[in-house]
Amino acid sequence: MRVPFVHKAPLLFIAIGLIVVSTVALSFVSYYYTVGRENLAETSLVQSNIKLASQSLDRIEKKIEDNDRILSEMIDVDEPSKWPEMVDAIKKADLNVDQVYFLRPGSDWPLYPPYSYEIRNQWGAFRASFKMKEIDIGRLALNQLHHLHMERPKNYFFATYVLKETRNGSRILVCFQMNFDKIMALVDSRLRDLQDRFYVSVVDFEGNGVYGQPISRSSKYFFETRFPNTLYKWILQIVPRNYTELELGVRNQRRTNLFFIITSMSLIFISLAIIFITGQRDRQLRKLKEDFISNVSHELKTPLSLIRMFSEMLVMGRVKDGDKKLEYYRVIHSESDRMSRLIANLLDFANLGRGIEYRHFEKTNIAHIVNEALEAYRHEIQKDGFQLNLEVDPDIPDSYADPNAITMAFLNLLDNSVKYSDDRKWIDVRIQRNNGFVDLSVTDRGVGIPESEQQKIFDKFYRGSDPSVRRIRGSGIGLAITKHVAEIHGGAILVKSEPGKGSTFTLKIPIRDTENNSKFEIRDSKS
Ligand code: ADP
């Protein structure tokens, strides 16, 4: 069924444009959708890493704070005599404490342990980190636990301190100096579980590794967080052990998605291009066919009106002069001959289109049939003012060919030379033996053919684009038939032409004595 408006070119352009726009839009949307989904998956993975790290951190903090509460409860500032006993109990319990100091706010000397020669080094080291002056005692709430965490030069000194008040109202600062190794053991016990799936590290602010090797921050799955209250000079870092695979997986997934999107877009564009080109060809062919019908009708009409006119004059007895009569009979004969050649061409062409071949191959001497055909038309051609030369090699052998088809092909070439010559009316027909072929060439000094059209002229319905050519009668099927004739003989048709100088068409027919023994192949239809 033919939907009338679908054949209009602008509509086709609009439809193709719409498909292109919607394909591009669809591709963008699907690309952003998949990227969005990947990002979401990535984000949720990062979130779960953050959650795990924060949970581990909380567990460490909680353990230290629980420890601190126990320590605070084990101290009774009202019983100085029991302090040594209390301190011993604390050191023995698994509470990570190295030493307990009882200090009077503002004083440079400890209440307990009393300053002595034995503890002078220990006390000196403690005082170097825990500077009473730097602690704003006035703002410390009673019985509230505080922490002091120092940098690497102070060996990450870590202490918990609490301000307490005795019954008689004097204030004592109790300070628990923690053991570094025990704190590290605590950190390790809480982080070990993570190590199966993560690289885990604790670093200080300068990036020095305290626990494990510092981790590079380059991965997007890397996460780090500070200890908020207790070990506040340290940072916990984690990254999944398989982060390179995860990143590679995401990258590959993205590439695969992109590949599919680009491939399907390209396929759609290629299909559109094919549809467009086919449509264009269809339109061109339709135009060529329409031109063909009008050309053929015109070609038939002209000889027919001549025949009618001259035959009428003869039938009515208006022509008395014998020579004139003869002249009119000749015109009727040549015009009817032109018509029958055109009709033969048309029938041949119609058969060609339907894939039907009526060919009769036999031993044929091409020189002989060309000579015969030329003799039949020589008079007519010369009468039009042409100089017609025939040159035949002496040893042209017989060939296995269809004489009618060869004659038709030759007459097409000859007819074209006559049609497309303007003032320089000169035609040269040559028959040569050439490397296993009989070369039949027809040369004229006519309008010539531009290089760009020298291949197209062999297409069916194609007529030269030059207006001077368009003015000449023609149907655009002569050379298509001639080419076909060359091909069914296993030969070829070649053209050599220069606009304004003339053309030479050469029909190459292989020399053979049966259907199958052609020894040569022609690859190109243009020399
Ligand atoms: P037609 O001559 O009916 O147009 P043909 O198939 O015989 O169709 O030729 C196709 C086209 O080739 C012609 O329209 C013309 O442009 C070009 N052509 C053929 N023979 C010649 C020639 N001898 N000189 C110049 N142009 C030619």
Image (tube, helix red, strand yellow):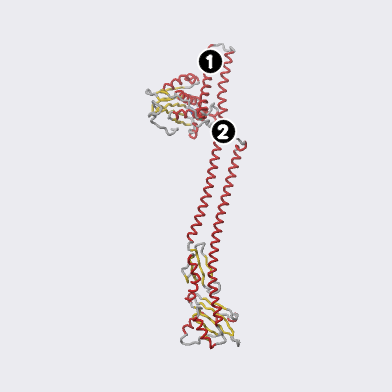
Vertical side of 367 occupied by 282: above or below: below
Is label 2 in contact with label 1 (beta carbons under 8 Å)?
Answer: no
Vertical side of 315 occupied by 246: above or below: below
Under tag 1, what secondary structure? helix
Q: Could you tell me which residue is drawn at 45 percent across and 27 percent down?
A: 443
Q: Could you say which is closer to the camera, residue 128 or residue 83?
A: 83
Vertical side of 25 occupied by 230: above or below: below
Please name the amino acid that badge 1 sits on.
Tyr
Q: Residues within 10 Å of mark 2 (few under 14, many from 20)?
A: few
Q: Position of residue 102 (x, y in %)?
A: 53, 84
Q: Give the label on residue 329, or none.
A: 1
Q: Quadrant of residue 77?
A: bottom right
Q: Could you tell me which residue is drawn at 52 percent across and 48 percent down?
A: 263
Question: Which tag, 2 or 1, sits closer to the chain's start?
Answer: 2
Quarter holding the N terminus is top right
Q: Position of residue 377 (x, y in %)?
A: 48, 20
Quarter holding the C terminus is top left
Q: Position of residue 318 (x, y in %)?
A: 59, 12
Q: Which residue is mark 2?
A: 286
Q: Position of residue 194 (x, y in %)?
A: 50, 67
Q: Residues within 10 Å of mark 1 (few under 14, many from 20)?
A: some
Please name the amino acid that badge 2 sits on.
Arg
Question: In this orientation, does residue 249 appear?
Answer: yes
